[in-house]
Image (cartoon, helix red, strand yellow):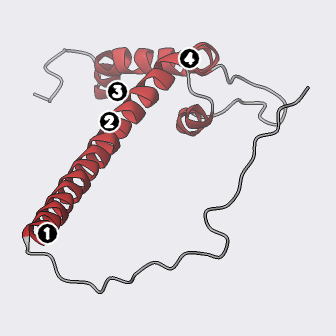
Amino acid sequence: PTAFGELPGVDLAEKMAKELSPVFDALRAIKHAEPVVKRVLYDYGPHHGHPEGISISDASVIHMTHPRDSEAAMLFAEHAQWAKREAMKSLGLAARDAYEAAEAANRANSAAMKALQRPSGSFPVYAEKKLPLEPFQAEVVEEP
């Protein structure tokens, strides 16, 4: 008995060929479909400079520079999430700064109120001297 079972009159190579034929068929289909996949999904089939086209791994690099619509939508959604996180950080920092500014204004207002409630100091008072020819003569001239 072998791993492939008992078939009288059939040698091991024929048994392996029977067992592995679906795998080989699938590989042939993949090999046959690769240019179609490149042309349809990646739009990078054979062209000047690359007669065989590009490989699937190269296509993923190319799609970061020229993304399809679905990939662009995913990139934009990811960027929107990043922008939302950055906006929330900025809003948090702005709120903290606004709170500190309000606290500083409150401290300044209370210091000003305490200064206004203290008894006033005495300041020297000087007598005003009149300027020469004061009060000044002013006449109104009517225009004809």
Residue 13, disc: 3
Give the distance between the C-alpha atoms of the residues marked 4 and 1, in whole angstroms: 72 Å
Mark 2 or mark 1, which is nearer the start of the sequence?
2
How would you rate the neighbour count of disc 4 (Cα within 10 Å): few for under 14, some for 14-19, many for 20 or more?
A: few
Of the residues tagged 4 and 3, which is closer to the observer?
A: 4
The residue singled out by tag 2 in the image is 84
User: CA–CA distance between discs 1 and 2?
Assistant: 40 Å
Q: Position of residue 81 (x, y in %)?
A: 33, 34
Q: Tell me how far mark 2 sits from mark 4, CA to CA.
A: 32 Å
Specify the amino acid type for callout 2: Lys
- Residues 110 and 34: in front is 110
- Tell me the kind of residue under disc 3: Ala
**Mark 2 or mark 4, which has the lower sequence index?**
4
- Quote the CA–CA distance across marks 2 and 3: 63 Å
Point out the tag, 1 or 3, that comes first from the N-terminus. Answer: 3
Q: Are marks 2 and 3 in contact (CB under 8 Å)?
A: no
Q: Earlier in the sequence, mark 2 or mark 3?
A: 3
Pick whichever, 54 or 93, lies toward us. Answer: 93
Residue drawn at x 14%, y 71% as measured from the top left: 115
Where is residue 123 drawn, in percent x and y?
A: 26, 84
For the residues carrying marks 4 and 1, which lies nearer the camera in this image? 1
Q: Which residue is mark 1?
A: 111
Q: Which mark is residue 41?
A: 4
Mark 1 and mark 3: span between their CA atoms?
100 Å
Determine which quarter of the picture holds residue 35. Answer: top right
- Report helix, strand or loop for mark 2: helix
Q: Secondary structure at mark 4?
A: helix
Judged from the image, the secondary structure of the residue bearing numbered disc 3 is helix
